[in-house]
Amino acid sequence: LLDSIENLGCGIDPAVFFSCSYCSTPARGYFESDSGVNVCYNYNFSKKRVAETMIHESIHAFDFCRAEMQGTCPHLACTEIRAANLSGECHFLPEMTRARSFQYRKRHQDCVRERAIASIRHHPACADKAEEVVAE
């Protein structure tokens, strides 16, 4: 993924692109186009979650590089859907243990939608229309 970002012309140095810090808001991590990926150590309790978070946030970095995203609500919805879908956080086994009423059918789709909506609700400009922009 990092090679793909590099090949798109968005040079990154993994030594400074990834950082880890305490986060005061409940989040596993976040991506900022000017500073890279930050992993919140107080919300990631296993190597697997750290890896999922790094992948999730790196997908945002790829999307911002590839599509020259402007941070509009539809752009945020698109990258959140892709990140939830591709990062592994909605894989079958983790979802089986998380889902309150597990239904095999459409569970991955439901997980992606739920995670995208939850992420968009953290963006103040889009919080009130998270469900709407994900549905589009």
Image: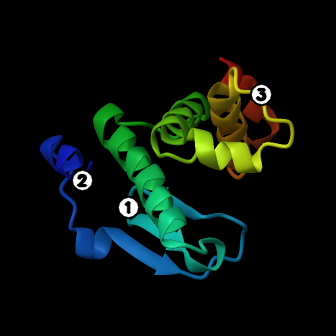
Look at the image and tell me whether residue 124 can be seen: no
Instruction: State left or right for residue 102 relative to residue 54.
Output: right
| Among the 4 quarters of the image, the one containing residue 109 | top right
- Residue ranking furthest to the right: 101
Residue 34: image tag: 1
Mark 3 sits on what residue? Answer: 103
Q: Position of residue 78 (x, y in %)?
A: 53, 30
Q: Nearer the viewer, mark 2 or mark 3?
A: 3
Task: Identify the residue at horizontal 78%, vertical 43% (top origin).
Answer: 99
Q: Position of residue 71 (x, y in %)?
A: 52, 41
Look at the numbered disc 3 and give the secondary structure of its residue.
Answer: loop
Q: Nearer the viewer, mark 2 or mark 1?
A: 2
| Among the 4 quarters of the image, the one containing residue 132 | top right
Q: Quadrant of the C terminus?
A: top right
| Among the 4 quarters of the image, the one containing residue 62 | top left
Q: Amino acid at mark 3?
A: Gln
State the separation of the CA atoms marked 2 and 3.
Answer: 35 Å
Task: Identify the residue at horizontal 23%, vertical 47% (top origin).
Answer: 5
Task: Identify the residue at horizontal 72%, vertical 70% (top origin).
Answer: 25
Question: Which numbered disc, 2 or 3, marks the residue that appears first in the sequence?
Answer: 2
Mark 2 sits on what residue? Answer: 2
Tell which of 87 and 35 is nearer to you: 87
Look at the image and tell me whether residue 23 can be seen: yes
Look at the numbered disc 1 and give the secondary structure of its residue.
Answer: loop
- Residue ranking furthest to the top: 136
Q: Image height check: is 80 above or below 49?
A: above
Question: Which numbered disc, 2 or 1, marks the residue that appears first in the sequence?
Answer: 2
Neighbourhood count class around disc 1 (C-alpha, 10 Å): few under 14, some 14–19, many 20 upward: few
Look at the numbered disc 2 and give the secondary structure of its residue.
Answer: helix
Q: Image height check: is 64 above or below 32?
A: above
